[in-house]
Amino acid sequence: MKTYPISIIIPVYKNYEMFFKFLEINKKYFSGCEVIVMNDYPGENITKKTKKIYPNIAVVNNKINLGFAGNVNSGVLRSTRDFVFLLNSDVVLRDNSYLRALEYFKKDKNLFAVGFAQIEKDGKIVGANKGYFENGLINHSSLLPTSPRRSLNEGGIPIFWAEGGSSLFRKDLFIFLGMLDELFNPFYWEDIDLSYRAWKAGYKIMYDPNVKVEHHHESTIGKYFDKSKILRTAFRNQLFFHWKNLTDKDLIIKHIVNIPKFIFIPGFFDALVKLPKILTSRKKTVKLFKKTDKEILNQFKS
């Protein structure tokens, strides 16, 4: 059997019925890769049942809840291959075409990650994304390429971030950049934050529309967290992202000018009380930056 330099990391939090169902489907596409399941619910040991489905798998049952970022980071550090494929437990593979992404990395040593096309329940395809600055915040939306799809030889399509649920990352850069920031626990914006740090440190993130997976987005978060908690955490983490990463003075000023509007949004004060920790994280982060905010965002202007 051919061996590939990929460690597939599957973070799991409850929702085991879906995890086992999709593992049964996905296992036929794991051949040649290391597979690590990171179970982040201390109340349940899933080793026996997981190995019954796929014996060649490593299962880690966390003794304490680490949150998405902490759980993924722990899996990355346990992995032994050169690349890590972060595969959410609610993602279904259609084939092993993710292996073709290795060719992108061979062609470009500055490539950090490759994101894949994700088919939603309604048939919509997401995964290609862009970032833009508006009303004091960096926002994101779908990227709709106006040019024909790029071939493998052309290096793929640049995207704002590689989604943490279905993307392939260069492991050494993942660790070098500081991994996912656990300030963002329990969820949201941690993959955008890491990707943005990668762009500003001089690395690239690309999208391959020809690698398709099915992604049942928020099947876990939506099941175990109420909507108000999700919205509050999302805005809190969006502020974390800005206070950590913005370095262009004019954008910082525009952000500060808009602060009075933000205080009425749930999550603002949750972010504010963490400001000392954010600034500590920022000191480490900005040392790696080589590019400005506008240099990154200008890439995604239509």
Image: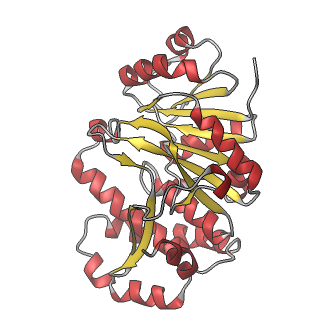
Extreme-top residue of the structure: 52
In this picture, is 31 found above or below 209? above
42 or 163, nearer to the observer:
163
68 vs 97, left or right, is left
Q: Quadrant of the C terminus?
A: bottom left
What residue sits 33% from the left and 69% below the top?
Answer: 269
In this picture, is 251 found above or below 142? below
Q: Quadrant of the N terminus?
A: top right
In this picture, is 22 found above or below 206? above
Across the whole image, how many numbered discs are drawn on residues?
0
Extreme-front residue of the structure: 148
**Image coords of residue 65 (percent x, y):** 49, 37
**Image coords of residue 122 (percent x, y):** 26, 40
254 or 149, nearer to the observer:
149
Q: How is the image coloured?
A: secondary structure
Q: In which quadrant of the rendered view does residue 120 lie?
A: top left
**Image coords of residue 53 (percent x, y):** 52, 11
Whether residue 274 can be seen here: no
In this picture, is 69 found above or below 63? below
105 vs 253, left or right, is right
Whether residue 266 can be seen here: yes
**Image coords of residue 41 (percent x, y):** 45, 30
What residue sits 30% from the left and 40% below the top?
Answer: 123
What residue sits 35% from the left and 79% below the top?
Answer: 134
Q: In which quadrant of the rendered view does residue 137 lie?
A: bottom left
